[in-house]
Image: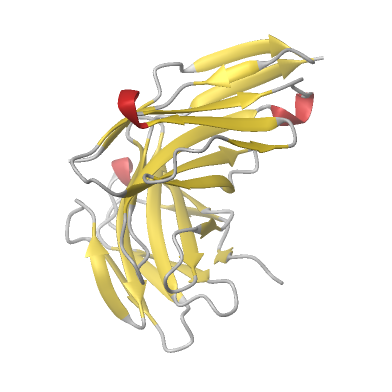
Amino acid sequence: KAGVTQTPRYLIKTRGQQVTLSCSPISGHRSVSWYQQTPGQGLQFLFEYFSETQRNKGNFPGRFSGRQFSNSRSEMNVSTLELGDSALYLCASSLAGSAEQFFGPGTRLTVL
Amino acid sequence: AQKVTQAQTEISVVEKEDVTLDCVYETRDTTYYLFWYKQPPSGELVFLIRRNSFDEQNEISGRYSWNFQKSTSSFNFTITASQVVDSAVYFCALSEFYTGANSKLTFGKGITLSVRP
């Protein structure tokens, strides 16, 4: 069974640009969560989607947004990029009703 | 608010030594989940274990064992006879207990474990 896949794996952008990251969950998993990992702040929860609805949101500015499609694939978007948005963005999926979240390899975003 | 503290930041051991990674948590919830994840250099978080707050049984899986003590709000992880492949960053995490939902994880800062040959 394929794991969680994230594309692209690496991305370099400049300040002010916007970026879209993609996550394909494990087949059958309908819940997708996004996390940001930085050396200073560690791993922080961004948001969680289930059946195309955002169910939970972390403490991030409105520049961070996401969505989920009917096939459970999810995208997150960051607009007006800032240097501090440089991070590893991790996506996790889980079965409905299960507490175990399975993570993808992440997208490493560098903002110059 | 939930909080996870991993006071150790870096640990270095020689292969075959036993090592314990500490985790202390804070929550006002009476029911919750605790987790350990491993992050190798590749970056992917690998799920190791989940523990429900109402199940204080310790668990052993091969060289790995976990000690959950609700009285001290601790969920420590021991690797017996460590190996070089155990070198990674280890995260302890806490989530609320919801049925039918994927709840957000609150992570500790992680412990970098280096196992030298």
Q: Position of residue B9 (x, y in %)?
A: 46, 18
Name the foreground residue: B7 vs B55. B55
| Coloring scheme used | secondary structure
Would residue B58 be found to the left or right of residue B69 on screen?
A: right
What residue sits 48% from the left and 69% below the top?
A: A22
**From what the image shows, is residue B6 above or below residue B41?**
above
Residue B37 seen anywhere in this rendered image of the structure: yes
What residue sits 63% from the left and 17% below the top?
A: B19
What residue sits 53% from the left and 54% below the top?
A: A106
Q: Position of residue B104 (x, y in %)?
A: 33, 55
What residue sits 40% from the left and 29% below the top?
A: B109
Residue A112 seen anywhere in this rendered image of the structure: no
Would residue A52 be found to the left or right of residue B41 on screen?
A: left
**Where, quadrant-wise, is the C terminus of chain A in this rendering?**
top left
**Figure disc tally:** 0
Q: Residue A20's image quarter? A: bottom left
Return the residue found at the far right: B117
**From what the image shows, is residue B49 above or below residue A47?**
above
**From what the image shows, is residue A99 above or below residue B42?**
below
Name the foreground residue: A24 vs A93. A93
Q: Residue A7's image quarter? A: bottom right
**Where, quadrant-wise, is the N terminus of chain A in this rendering?**
bottom right
Q: Position of residue B1 (x, y in %)?
A: 17, 41
Q: Position of residue A104 (x, y in %)?
A: 56, 58
Name the foreground residue: B16 vs A12. B16
Would residue B79 be found to the left or right of residue B47 on screen?
A: right
